[in-house]
Image (cartoon, coloured by chain):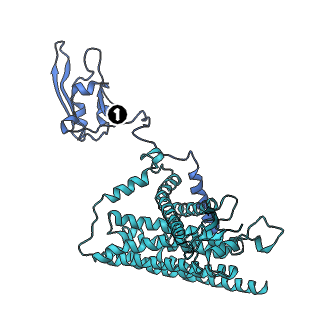
Chain colours: A blue, B cyan
Amino acid sequence: MFKEFAKGLSITLKHLLPGNCTTVQYPKQKLEMPPRFRGLHRLIPTPDREKCVACYLCPTVCPAKCITVVAAENEAGEKYPAVFEIDILRCIFCGYCVEACPMEAIEMTDAYELANFSRDDFHFDKQRLLKP
Amino acid sequence: MTPEVLTLSETPWLYTGVMLVKIIVAFVATLLIVAYATYAERKIIGRMQTRMGPNMTGPKGLLQPIADGLKLFFKEDIIPSQAHWFAFILAPMMILAPAFISISVIPFGGDLQFSYDGILYAVPMQITDLNIGVLFIVAMAGLGVYGIVLAGLASNSKYALLGGIRSTAQMVSYELAVGLSIVAIFMLSETLSLRGIVAAQQLPLWGLESVSFIPNWYIFCQPLAFGLFVIGSMAEINRTPFDLPEAETELVSGFCTEYSAMKYALFFMAEYANMITVSAIATTLFLGGWGGPFYGWINFLIKVFAFMFFFIWIRATFPRLRYDQLMFLGWKIMLPLALVNIVITGIAILLW
């Protein structure tokens, strides 16, 4: 019995030694996110437009129904999304849209600090999603 | 020149002044240690659980106890409508006063000499040297129970009541074992004065001149009594693994569930003051009080802090006992062991 007591005490004493602390001082110090982390979405641009061709696969596959796409045709006769909106408040960050996209036009970044002040700030339109 | 002893009849003003200074110094030091014991506890337990502990308020979180105190001071003081208001207010005071009073008989150093008006005076570094010092401490420890019971009863809440009942049973049964374990010390020192007990521990070990570098601390000849005393006092001051009266998982927070603001802070302070008192008593009775390599009170504080670290360490390590295990340990293991220890000590004293 006393051996077990001593063993327990030695474990806690070992943890007390400097260098055993596992806390990350979060706002000051941030962890590197793993490459497959699913954070805020981003639409990938090409030099003159966005890669997206408005095929409607992502709003179809989205389980939370948070993606709104309206397709249109530009001067060159190409299909493009006139409206591409994601309601981040409804998004569950499952990453199905990224998997479904045939053009690899949408990806998920490592941004996770998404808190904001008003509901409207959580509507990410095309311009905001195109930002790097 | 042998120093004069200060007396109330010959030098009343000087005596009163010295006494007041001693009381203020001891009280302020105790309060400071209480404040920073909370910080030390949170920091050490945090580290032992590989967390940081408080580190935002001031450099390394050193202002945390002051911030906590301020916060509790400005909180709303709620007295539940169904509580008995007089007993409700009285309880935290009744719990805090005995915890602080016990400090008054503990010697924290040898004599301090100073000359005044051409006469050399010697002042013992102890507020008062009662010739029944140990009995006084045991009595005060007994009074501490009333505060907890009263808090439990006055709150008119089932958790508080359960906490109060638990703590009464626990403290009464462990006080017996603790009291009996101290008896062996009196038998060796043949005095109840704490100063006398410390003086007896400064002789060489077992009266042997050949090992005169080892002091005659009672931990060497009474290891069993020491163990019983430490375990028993841990139970008496309601610290983990014996913190059943305030078991968070079962009783919210036991007898202080209904308390808020400064009254709650008083309970908290009493808990830590009790820890200091118990450490100081254990130091005085078993570890030779202020004796040691450094100057008087520094030795004393080092030993007290070592004890407090031990209590914190235990808290970070062990889970809480079940209630029947607690009673089993108190009545069926510690009490018989304490009695056996007294008998063996008696036989040993008769033989040598």
Q: Nearer the viewer, residue B131 or B229?
A: B131
Q: Can residue A40 be seen in this snapshot? A: yes
Circle 1 sits on which residue?
A111
Q: Position of residue A52 (x, y in %)?
A: 25, 23
Q: Is residue B230 left or right of residue A123?
A: right
Q: Position of residue B28 (x, y in %)?
A: 48, 61
Residue in the image at 55% along x and 75% along y: B8
* Residue B24 percent location from the top left of the image: 49, 64
Residue B248 visible? The answer is no
At 32% across and 77% down in the image, what residue appears? B87
- Is A45 rendered above or below residue A59? above
**In the current view of this chain or complex, which residue is farthest to the right?**
B210
> Quarter of the image containing the C terminus of chain A?
top left
Q: Secondary structure at mark 1?
A: loop
In the depicted view, which residue is nearer to us: A51 or B278?
B278
Quarter of the image for residue A51 reads top left
- The residue that appears at 20% across and 31% down in the rendered structure is A85
- Estimate how packed mark 1 is, as few (under 14), some (14 to 19) or many (20 or more) residues with alpha carbons within 10 Å: few
Q: Chain of mark 1?
A: A
